[in-house]
Amino acid sequence: MLVLRVAVVLALCACAASDRYHAEPPARAAAAPAPRQAELAKAYWYDEAQAAIEKRARRSAGKGKAKNIVFFLGDGMSIPTLAAARTLLGQRQGRTGEESELSFESFPSVGLSKTYCVNHQIADSACSATAYLCGVKNNYGTLGLTAAVARHDCEASLDASTHLESIAAWATQDGRDAGVVTNTRITHASPAGLYAKAANRNWERDEQVTAANVNISSCPDIAHQLIHHYPGNEFKVILGGGRREFYPNTIRDDEDSLGRRTDDRNLVEEWFEEKRSRNATYEYLWNRSQLKDALNNPPDYILGLFEDTHIPYHAEANNETEPTLAEMTELAIKTLQRNENGFFLFVESGRIDHAHHDNYVELALDETIRLSDAVTVATELLSEEDSLIVVTADHAHVMAFNGYTQRGGSIVGRSDYTGQDGVPYMTISYANGPGARAQTDGVRVDVTAEENFGDLRWRSHAEVPLSSETHGGDDVGVFARGPHHDLFTGVYEQSQLPHLMAYAGRFGPGAHACNAAPVLANTIAFTSLLVVLLAIQRFLCL
Ligand SMILES: *[C@@H]1O[C@H](CO)[C@@H](O)[C@H](O)[C@H]1NC(C)=O
Ligand SMILES: *[C@@H]1O[C@H](CO)[C@@H](O)[C@H](O)[C@H]1NC(C)=O
Ligand SMILES: *[C@@H]1O[C@H](CO)[C@@H](O)[C@H](O)[C@H]1NC(C)=O
Ligand SMILES: *[C@@H]1O[C@H](CO)[C@@H](O)[C@H](O)[C@H]1NC(C)=O
Ligand SMILES: [Zn+2]
């Protein structure tokens, strides 16, 4: 009884500390097998990925080298979300819709990634970001650290053997430039996977670290890490939301919102100072027209923070102050393209996830269409010959696309059919979330009769009542175009993704990809073999 009460209290406390969309997990209800010890080490996931690449590379027809890599992430962009979003896109153009196509759906290679984390069947955006950016699976809610670190355990994260490097670090070590674009707070879990090591994704600013009784000099907040730690301090372009995590709570920003830092530090000023110390040119942006101006002649470094928290949904945004994801992507590519060694850019459409959590299906589908627009920009600016573009999701959601509606039926409308109870149901509904309606006298509510039915913030129906709809555990799609795109086919661990991208670009753990032959060079007897090997190497790599 006492144990149960303690567990309940713990679960409640944890909930209070989490963000609105992502509930903290309660204590496990029933004993389940623990993950294998081997999975706690970085080497396990590196070896898993490299072995898979070796197998796949043998039958790969891919050649060339990816000089530039743009990696797009639709947060929570499940496969049903893709089917529904393409249908909405077509219907907005006055067609039946189902035959429509998102920009990346015509990419030559498609695969599926398995998104579970070391200790969770269903991922959050922190453990999945660690997988798809650092190439290692880890624990739910943790960033840039192996699964040897439990959530909230700052102490354990001080052990250097738990530290992971992201593909952005691999790229800068190879002389490339790196950048990040998101429409969430730049310190939110997905973008933070690129530059932070944190035992808790919620440690976005100092106050959240100190409130958890954690020593902030040992475990600095995520905003601080972006500005002062490697590789964030090397990023040439940083575009997103979340200004409040960078300003002290005594300062009002350009849009009159108060900062939230309690350590009196102005990290935007500190970023300026750091760039000045490099004698570099730099610019800080907070609105759309500034972003448009910057396109003409970008400075060496750009920091754009367009909102105090997440950037609003595109369909609800003020188009004078908020840039679109496509516009941010354009500025990022034009800034990074100046490095002749190439670049790595991460672009997240992060609010698909938030809209799903609220059962706001039309907003989730619209945000997916905005990702498609951003990918179009990248395909127009970059050549298929030297630039790899990969599009995927971090995890699924529990949105269902159901019923037997006729061709061209509104994707956000009701099914042509009713339930056995004679009450209509929607073509899209959710397994759980805040859209659950209580039945009256055992009869389901006719949601189509509701006053705000069809509004952007009308909630789709959900079965299990929850304050926030949950992620799904199904696989997500991976779409690839450019050098070595065919490596991305098949069904594989999400943690293989950065290894595959680095292989295509021959850097980081992929640097060895085409360098095996010179080892034999000293042995005269192998000269003829070497010629053959070099020929193969040319075919595969150059
Ligand atoms: C916090 O950590 C720093 C360095 O890691 C250490 O010097 C300091 O003594 C710690 N403070 C406390 C209160 O433990
Ligand atoms: C910046 O410029 C100053 C003056 O021209 C020079 O003394 C300094 O070494 C430069 N610093 C860097 C990091 O290049
Ligand atoms: C901005 O939004 C307003 C109001 O919705 C609209 O009339 C206008 O065409 C939009 N402008 C641009 C450039 O998208
Ligand atoms: C954008 O920012 C610039 C510089 O602060 C300012 O002059 C301009 O009025 C802003 N534009 C809007 C639409 O707020
Ligand atoms: Zn989520």
Image: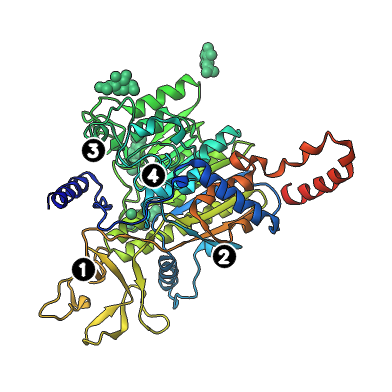
Q: Quadrant of residue 516?
A: top right
Query: Which residue was labeled with disc 4?
Result: 288
Q: CA distance from mark 4 to mark 2?
A: 30 Å
Q: Is mark 3 within 8 Å of ligand 4?
A: no
Q: Amino acid at mark 4?
A: Arg
Q: What amino acid type is highlighted by mark number 3?
A: Ser
Q: Amino acid at mark 1?
A: Ala
Q: Which residue is mark 1?
A: 436
Mark 4 against mark 2, which lies toward the viewer? 2
Cβ atoms under marks 2 and 1 closer than 8 Å: no
In the depicted structure, whether residue 6 falls above or below residue 372: above
Circles 3, 2 touching at the beta carbon (< 8 Å): no
Q: Viewer-nearest of labels 3 and 2?
A: 2
Is 354 situated above or below 332? below
| Tag 4 secondary structure | helix
Residue bearing the label numbered 2: 106
Observer-side mark, 3 or 4, equals 3
For the point 50% across and 34% down, the residue is: 236
Residue 172, disc: none
97 or 62, nearer to the observer: 62
Q: How many marks?
A: 4
Across and down, in percent, residue 181 comes to 44, 44
Q: Amino acid at mark 2?
A: Ser
Residue 444: x and y in percent read 18, 79
Disc 2/disc 1 C-alpha distance (Å): 36 Å
Q: Tags 3 and 1 in contact by the CB under 8 Å rule?
A: no
Secondary-structure class at tag 1:
loop
Number of residues whose C-alpha sits closer than 10 Å to that of mark 3, classed few (under 14), some (14–19) or many (20 or more): some
Please identify, in this view, whether the residue under mark 3 or under mark 1 is nearer the observer. Answer: 1
- Relative side of 463 to 481, left or right: left
Q: Quadrant of ligand 5?
A: bottom left
Q: Which mark sits nearer the N-terminus, 4 or 2? A: 2
